[in-house]
């Protein structure tokens, strides 16, 4: 989910493991030469999901070393991304209580297209209800309600 700490935790985890860190959204922005927000505004979510799928496929097929890949909050809920990611590596769901997601994201809603609404808390709960069945198919679920370094320690303990 947005606000679960995917990028922050991913960077810390990659560093701890000595892996490369890849942020899917950053790769999309590089390819599109636009922010995710601009892609959504100019081309819509359907276009974004198609690009997301292609960039993810490229990362998976071309990457030769060990990496931690931070996916977008909706990545696994679209196209064949869930199966593709599970086949390529270990998928970890960073589970965060909805009220903490709201708190973490309260100042970021304008930069997050799906949360740029009059009621971001309602939208977060709606997104979670739509996506949780996909998240629950991850190889591991890790409680990410604490600080990122604590989440990293939990991840290391379950993947070891």
Image (spheres, rainbow, N blue to C red):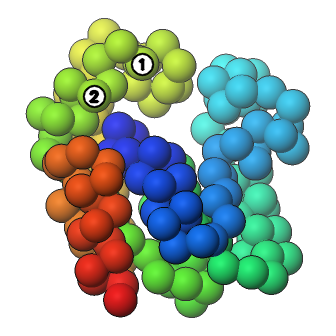
- Can the viewer see residue 60 in this picture? yes
Q: 16 above or below 101?
A: below
Tell me which corner region of the image, top left, top right, bottom left or bottom right, holds residue 106.
top left
Mark 2 Cα-neighbour bin, 10 Å: few <14, some 14–19, many ≥20: some
Q: Which mark is residue 42?
A: none
Residue occupying image coordinates x 80% and y 82%: 64
Residue 88 drawn at (x, y percent): 61, 85
Q: 57 above or below 110?
A: below
Q: Which residue is mark 1?
A: 108
Q: Nearer the viewer, residue 154 or 144?
A: 154
Residue occupying image coordinates x 76% and y 37%: 29
Tell me which corner region of the image, top left, top right, bottom left or bottom right, holds residue 107.
top left
Q: Nearer the viewer, residue 55 or 22?
A: 22
Q: Nearer the viewer, residue 83 or 147?
A: 147
* Contact flag, marks 2 and 1 (Cβ < 8 Å): yes
Residue occupying image coordinates x 47% and y 55%: 12
Q: CA distance from mark 2 to mark 1?
A: 8 Å
**How many numbered callouts?**
2
Tell me which corner region of the image, top left, top right, bottom left or bottom right, holds residue 100.
top left
Is residue 41 left or right of 17 when viewed as pictured? right
Residue occupying image coordinates x 44% and y 76%: 91
Q: Nearer the viewer, residue 66 or 85?
A: 66
Quarter holding the C terminus is bottom left
Residue 5 drawn at (x, y percent): 37, 45
- Can the viewer see residue 80 in this picture? no
Describe the element under mark 1 as helix, strand or loop: loop
Q: Which residue is mark 2?
A: 104
Mark 1 Cα-neighbour bin, 10 Å: few <14, some 14–19, many ≥20: few
Residue 133 drawn at (x, y percent): 27, 68
Describe the element under mark 2 as helix, strand or loop: helix
Is residue 1 left or right of 53 when viewed as pictured? left
């Amino acid at each position: 989910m947005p606000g679960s700490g995917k990028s922050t935790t991913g960077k810390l985890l990659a560093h701890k493991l000595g892996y490369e860190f890849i942020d899917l959204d950053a790769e999309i922005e590089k390819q599109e030469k636009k922010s995710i927000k601009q892609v959504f505004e100019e081309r819509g979510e359907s276009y974004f999901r198609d690009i997301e799928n292609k960039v993810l496929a490229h990362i998976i097929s071309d990457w030769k070393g060990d990496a931690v890949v931070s996916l977008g909050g909706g990545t696994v809920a679209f196209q064949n991304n869930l199966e593709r990611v599970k086949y390529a590596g270990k998928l970890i769901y960073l589970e965060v209580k909805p009220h903490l997601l709201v708190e973490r994201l309260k100042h970021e809603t304008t930069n997050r297209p799906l949360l740029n609404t009059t009621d971001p808390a309602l939208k977060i709960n709606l997104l979670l209800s739509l996506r949780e069945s996909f998240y629950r198919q991850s190889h591991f679920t890790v409680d990410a309600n604490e600080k990122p370094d604590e989440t990293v320690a939990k991840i290391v303990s379950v993947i070891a």
